[in-house]
Amino acid sequence: MEWFEVLKWWLVLEIIGFTAIPLTAWIFRDMTGKGLSLSKILGLMLITYFSWVLTHLGCSYGSTIVGISLLLVIAASLIVLLRYGYSFDKKEFIITEMLFTAAFLCFVVFRAYRPEIYWTGGEKLMDISFINIILRSTSFSPMDPWLSGEPMQYYYFGYLVVANLIKLSFVPSTIGFNLGVASMFALSATAAYGIGRDLTHSKVFGILIMAFVVILGNLASFLQLIVILIPKYYHIFNIPDVDLWGRLSTYYYWSASRVIPDTINEFPYFSFIHGDLHAHMIGIAFQLLMIALLFHLLRQEKEWHVPTLAMITLLLGFIFLVNSWDYPTYAIFFIIVLAAWRIRVLAASKNIHSFTERALNLPIMELLKIIGVGAVVGIGSIMLYLPYHLKGGMSHPLCLVTYGQTQLLFYLGVFGIMLILIMLFVILNVCDMYYPDMKIIFTGLAITMVAAYMTNIQILIIILPLIIMSIYCLIKEKEPQLQFIYLLILFGALLSLFCELFYIQDVLGISSPQCIRLNTVFKIYIQNWIVWALAAGVSYFYLWQRINTSDKRHLMFAVALVLLILGAMSYPVFATYSHSHQFDGEPTLDGAAYLQQECPNEYNAIQWLNNISGTPVVLQSPGQSYRLNNHITAFTGLPTVIGWVGHEMTWRNRDKVIDERRSEVPKVYTSDDINIVDQILIKYQVKYIYIGMVEEEQYQDHDTRKFFENYPNRFELVYHNPTVSIYRVMEQDV
């Protein structure tokens, strides 16, 4: 395995994290550990932003610019250090670094047994295409690798984060891809630990909360394990009747992400082991950084803290460019937290105890301030990234869901384990604050049942009581720490409810009406998982504190809590074991190594093309999503005229240019008219024409090579092996 590359990558992450510590500690000065668990994420965000800004100011993007961006982070930290000082907690630093390194190395080993940047059931070829074309770019926005000559119509900052790490570590991109996946897991795990540690003041429960966020599986994954262990179900799921470990090796990691019909229900650990270095997965670490900032904001005791608000503004805008689905969610969450903070601070200054009274006595000027600050942060988050937004992008309408809402059983399959803990926590706290009689309980249940029946939204049976109880607890609670937990619970419930009422319309929903909610549920449920995982972990902490081991009933409850965690642990254990090929085979981190074995001629052609500088257009056959095609673009970063057509249609809302390119490109391989071929090549500024196994199969009735050989003044054969030919289009003809 490529341990030297791992070491270089890890050292770069350590340097970034260490240089950002004073700045992080200044911002998170009230946090346990002063934000040590977040310094790497903050450092990566700042380096990415600085490198992007410097490139837009006229500098040529490359290793030098990324290095200068790192120096700017160092300079900012030094200024803070000289002005405010920093007391270094060595013990907390060692614990955090040990956790990060352990998480990173564990996932490095896992990726080494499943390194393939593959095409089926995922979008790894898309991800590596974006990373490689950014690595080749000298300016931004980068070119779309699958629509040459057009700017990338996709949020690309997550790929820029990884590209910057590749630039700093000088690791090959096919190895950097897998190290990037391991890094995102380790960064998210460390951040979740830091937040959990801060919410519970316990290292043990900090680790448990980390597990809730990035490791544990859902209830459906546990049920799959039960089915595997029961012999009478073997024939239904094609499970071999062999020894126990043989059956467990058939554990299918994929099923846990497809619980609700016609939707995707990914959760962090699935995303990490699936290994698509995709926007929603990269965004997890930055979501956690935002949650930490909002918690820090909520517990401020002083007046408006400009550095905190400035960092929220910068991060909010950054989130838009990492995964734009996260932007409205955290913009709304920011406004809610901002309002809750101001109400609490003003009430404390006037010694008002009732939250309701606090809200009703909120001065008009203060309300205007909240609105004004919210507007400034929102506008600022766009203005700081204005060049990106001026490039334009596709907008998709918000539509009402009229059919296909989630059935309660499937919903519990996704969130059931968390909901058990959250509901227990909230119910017990409501009972502590207020003792309702049975009439009120039955009335509330009846209203919930009627609402669920009349609206056909089954999850209202759970969501409506959870919303009401979390609001009630929020009103009664005075401690900002517990207020934040109720806000997480409330916001998660609202996210779940949103997916039952609305969906974002995209091309997939138009072409497949049964899948109208697929992407909406996919992207929002990950956000829902993160906020509820934090809340469930803290709920576990408070429930555990209630246990009196001398009481048998309490002891049984403690055992039930432990069994709940063990059930959730089944997924990471068995999914990792089965998906890693049972850790059998020769480990490597090179995501293209499989191509060298399965398609050596294609691999050798890729190696030759990687010696070409710049971004000349290489013509390939139009790509079909989730198939082995456009792998030349993927592993070289050289753009092609039209790549995965289905993806481009989604990004560009069926733009007619896609159909135009899809119809014109095959003519280069099939036409006998040199004038038609010339027109197409000139139109798309094609420099190289690739003929490999995909083109041979697709255009087998045409002798394309012979046609090019008939025009030696127009096409020069610059590379050839038994199955691949690459022709350079002569300059005078283009």
Image (cartoon, grey):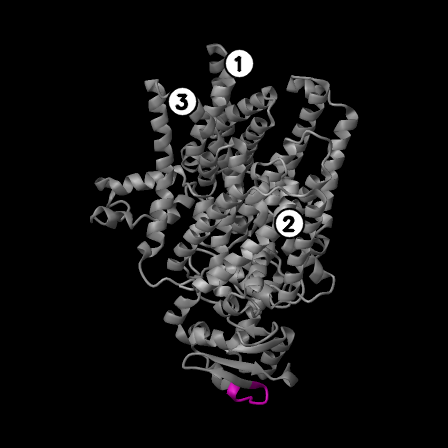
Near mark 2 (Cα within 10 A), the count class, few <14, some 14-19 or many ≥20, is many
Nearest to N terminus: mark 1 or mark 3: 1
* 272 relative to 674 in the view: left or right: left
Q: Which residue is mark 3?
A: 547
- Whether label 3 touches label 2, CB < 8 Å: no
Near mark 1 (Cα within 10 A), the count class, few <14, some 14-19 or many ≥20, is few
User: What is the three-letter code of the residue carrying label 2?
Assistant: Phe
Element type at mark 3: loop
In three-dimensional space, the C-alpha distance between marks 2 and 1, rounded to whole angstroms, equals 43 Å
Q: Which residue is mark 2?
A: 318
User: What is the three-letter code of the residue carrying label 3?
Assistant: Ile
Place of residue 431 in the rendered image (x, y in percent of width and height, measured from the top left) = 49, 16
Q: Which residue is mark 1?
A: 434
Q: Is residue 402 visible?
A: no
Nearest to N terminus: mark 2 or mark 1: 2
Residue at horizontal 34 percent and vertical 63 percent from the top: 586
Nearest to N terminus: mark 3 or mark 2: 2
Q: Is residue 101 visible?
A: yes
Element type at mark 2: helix
Which numbered disc, 3 or 2, marks the residue closer to the eye? Answer: 3
Residue at horizontal 54 percent and vertical 35 percent from the top: 198
Asked if residue 340 is positioned above or below residue 638 in the image, the reply reads: above
Image quarter of the N terminus: bottom left
In this rendered view, identify the residue nearer to me: 235 or 360.
Answer: 360
**Prevailing SS of the magenta stretch:** loop
The answer to whether residue 131 is magenta is no
Give the residues in magenta: 708-715
In this rendered view, identify the residue nearer to me: 591 or 548.
Answer: 548
